Amino acid sequence: MIVEDVRRAETARGWRLSAAVRTKAAPGVTRLYFTVRGGKPDWLPERGDAFLAALLMPAMSLGEELAVDAPVSRRLIRSARTVMEIYSTWWQQFRTIRVVAAETCAAVGGQDAVGLFFTTGVDCFYSLLKDGERRAEPGHQPVTDLLFANFEQHCGPDHDRLVARIGHVAARTGCRAVVVDTNLRFFTDPLAGWEAYHGAALGSVALGLQGLLGRCLIAASDQYRHLPPLGSHPVLDHLWSTECLEIVHDGAEATRTEKVERHLARAELALENLTVCWRGRPDRNCGVCEKCLRTMVAFELAGALHRCRTLPGPLDLDRLRTVAICSEDAQDAMRSMVREARARGRHDIADAAEAALRHQARRSGQGVR
């Protein structure tokens, strides 16, 4: 796989960093891009770091050498070896490959800005609210920019409302909203499943913004006590850092319910703007999918479901018993929820969640762990 012609250009929507990508597996050339709506040209240095992070897993899937014809951080290219060792250990379909760059040099140009990837979900709201409480601590670098990566290339009124909601949260917390449009998933989805790949995707967006960011937070999905293989992970995310950009996996000290109890349940900003749904429209929660129901359980256990204006209540345990839990990550999250519900004496919720896991096991022909 060859990455070449890395360039920055102004478009109608904002400044764009792009590169031509060629692979033996498909004819022709694909132009991979990151477009920052508005923004400034110096936010997007003409380097290969973002493309190395974006294409490492797809190249491993194909078993092709990854050659980047652009400057790449020495630190990043060293870390790529460790990333490949982790990937190939967790997921056997990814093979270790050779990674080369036209030039390896220390990345320069990072500013003091601190980014946080933000979708108005539980994990990122927790990181944002926790950051707000720590602003007075000596040496703390507060979040300055809320980053939204439009990986699905959504557009239209629903998407505009979600972006407006992110902008509203940014304004209320003294931050700047930065929206990045990218065709990354169009290129990578056939080669790498999102559950395994999404951490690299987030890392690549942050690396594309090295001219702006000196630090960037990726909100944790899981808790330190329970860390199954996942694309965004404490052992992985920091490996996308360069000499001028520190990438941090943030918030793994708390479970989903603990995040709600500690911060979201008492924050009007979160209660008015929380959006977690992957199934329905991008600006609202359907209330019936696994992600919505799991979030509703967390708020119910925290005694705050009735206060969250974006989640439909009350909690329907019959719906929870039969909800589809398709991904292994979602099943792990449901098992964690069972333990939390039992610990809080909510055996009705735990029983319903266990029934859902049994239903899913029967669907897939597996036993319940």
Image: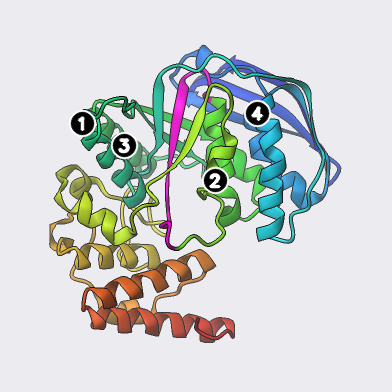
The x, y position of residue 164, in whole percent, is: 30, 35
Mark 2–mark 1 Cα distance, whole angstroms, equals 27 Å
Front-lying residue, 17 or 103: 103
In the image as oriented, which residue stretches furthest toward the front?
Answer: 138
The x, y position of residue 139, in whole percent, is: 31, 25
Q: Nearer the viewer, mark 4 or mark 2?
A: 4
Name the image quarter holding the N terminus.
top right
Q: Which residue is mark 1?
A: 172
Dot 1 falls on a residue whose secondary structure is helix
Q: Which residue is mark 2?
A: 199
Q: Nearer the viewer, mark 3 or mark 4?
A: 4
Q: What span is in magenta?
A: 209-225
The x, y position of residue 276, in whole percent, is: 35, 54
Residues at circles 2 and 1 in contact by the CB criterion of under 8 Å: no
Mark 1–mark 3 Cα distance, whole angstroms, equals 10 Å
Disc 1 marks a residue whose amino acid type is Arg
Disc 4 marks a residue whose amino acid type is Arg
Q: Residue at x 23, y 31 (%)?
A: 173
- Answer with mark 1 or mark 3, whichever residue precedes in sequence: 3
Q: Which residue is mark 3?
A: 166
State which quadrant residue 224 falls in: bottom left
Dot 2 falls on a residue whose secondary structure is helix
Q: Is residue 65 left or right of residue 116?
A: right
State which quadrant residue 175 falls in: top left
Disc sitting over residue 75 in the figure: 4
User: Callout 3: few (<14), some (14-19), or many (20+) C-alpha neighbours within 10 Å?
Assistant: many
Dot 3 falls on a residue whose secondary structure is helix
Disc 2 marks a residue whose amino acid type is Gly
